[in-house]
Image (cartoon, rainbow, N blue to C red):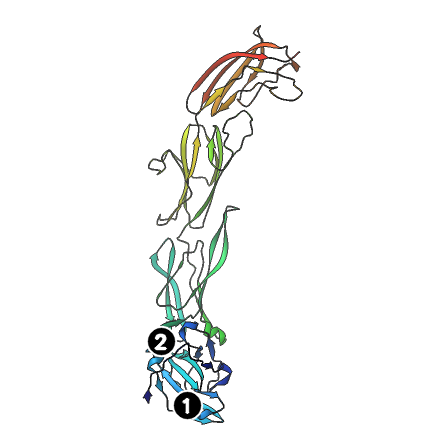
Amino acid sequence: MKRVIIIFSLLLPFFQLQAADFKWLGNLDKVISVLPPSSSGLNEVCVLQSLQGVSLSVETAVPAAVRWYRYSNLGGGFAEELTDVSVVDGMSRLNIVEPDMGYIIEDGNERHAIWVVDYGQHEFTASALGPSSEKDCMNMALNFSGNADEIVYYSINGRRLVLDREIRLAYRTLEPDQSSLAFNEKETSVSFVSLSGTIMVPAPLCATDFTLEGDRFLREWGRAIEVTSPVVEPYAVSSLTSAVQTERDADNEVNSGSGESLGGSAPCIIDFEAAVTDGAIFREWQFSRMADFDVIDMRISDLSFTHTFNEEGTTYVRFVCANSDGGCEHVGETYAVNIGTSSLKCPNAFSPGNADGVNDEWKVSYASIIDFECHIFDRYGRKMISLTHPSQGWDGKYKGKLVPSGAYFYVIKAKGADGRKYELSGDINIVNYE
């Protein structure tokens, strides 16, 4: 057998023999042709169930002029010209095709380069599949018994390449849906080029079994096999959370907290809600005045609850869940609720009954007032109205009728979220009224 050096150049005007010009003989099953990367210099990778008694023929105008070469992992530059070739029925035939080898067929200016795989030497088998004792909060390890080794081939320049066996592992997990704050069960799958021993997959978030099925070649030949594991309980955990602040529309409250940030003027009412995956046994909301939660001031085990923030400053809130042994923990988003300092200002005049509706009601301007009591009197000491919330106002009426213009008197006792106490009194002048 003669070894020759074959030099490939993109500058040479070679034409490719077409796959239809080739005929596999002695093989009763379909030959699977895989298109390799163009950089490999190969036209195709041919996968056969067995090479026993198999030969390869090429149809050409001058069969005797066809030259056959074989190369190994060294690449086409070290190809050997083959001599066990014959002309049969007007076709050039390679009588013996060896497994896991590259072949270059030349007919004048035409060339076809292939790699031949004997699948029988790499056949996918699967006898057992089950969870490993290794535990990881991000991934699950499965022990696989069987054969799914790499199917290696080599490019014309000797570069090592691997066929994708497309081995599929299907199982169930939970998918987060933030819009509905829920986890929904879904079927998922992972594909593997090859397998050896332990399989690592994203950890499922619900109880599931695993089904391994393969491979692409057995599927195409109609005899794919599969193996299923026992049901595995979830070990990993996850959560979804939300914090929605109750908005207030009082026109005399400063910084009532509307917008994307949480907090503003107290009292600040926020609805907290969490959803957890099946493995989350430990669950709690944590409150702290420290961003790193070194000191936790309050814990709430309910998934959903409403909390009112009445203290000035920033409170940090987060949700934490963990599995039964605490080996996996998930910490949700940290919410910063910032309550501002208090303020309380009183106007000294207004004009009730105005047709244009401008300045026709007496109201204080306030922020972070958590206790409020206001009484308004006329000059004779008769009480006109009592207000119990700073958002309330006086429309200038007493027993349903507008009071006369002139001076009135208010007395206010209030308390702010920052602990400040207010004791205010002063005049209210009703003007521009007849």
**Mark 1 or 2, nearer chain start:** 1
Compared with 3, 266 (above or below) is above
Q: Is residue 284 visible?
A: no
Where residue 305 sits in the image (x, y, percent)? 48, 37
Which residue reaches farthest front?
11
Circles 1 and 2 in contact, beta carbons < 8 Å: no
Marks 1 and 2, how far apart in space? 26 Å
Q: Is residue 370 left or right of residue 288?
A: right
Badge 2 local density, few (<14 within 10 Å), some, or many (20+)?
some
Instruction: Give percent across and percent down for residue 146.
Output: 38, 71
Pointer 1 local density, CA inside 10 Å: few below 14, some 14–19, many at least 20: some
Image: 403 above or below 30: above
Query: In terms of image quadrants, where is residue 127?
Result: bottom left
The image quadrant where one finds the N terminus is bottom left
- Nearer the observer, 210 or 343: 343
Answer whether residue 40 is visible to the viewer in this image.
Answer: yes
Can you say whether 126 is above or below 97 in the image?
above
**In this figure, which residue is indicated by the disc labeled 1?**
95
Q: How many marks?
A: 2
Q: Amino acid at mark 2?
A: Asn
Q: Residue furthest top?
A: 380
Considering the numbered disc 2 on the image, is that residue within a helix, a strand or a loop?
Answer: loop
**Amino acid under disc 1:** Asn
Query: Residue at position x 52%, y 26% from top?
Result: 253
- The location of residue 416, given as percent across then percent down, is 45, 22
Residue located 47% across and 35% down the image: 262
Tell me the element at label 1.
loop
Residue 244 at x, y percent in the picture:
50, 38
Q: Which residue is mark 2?
A: 157
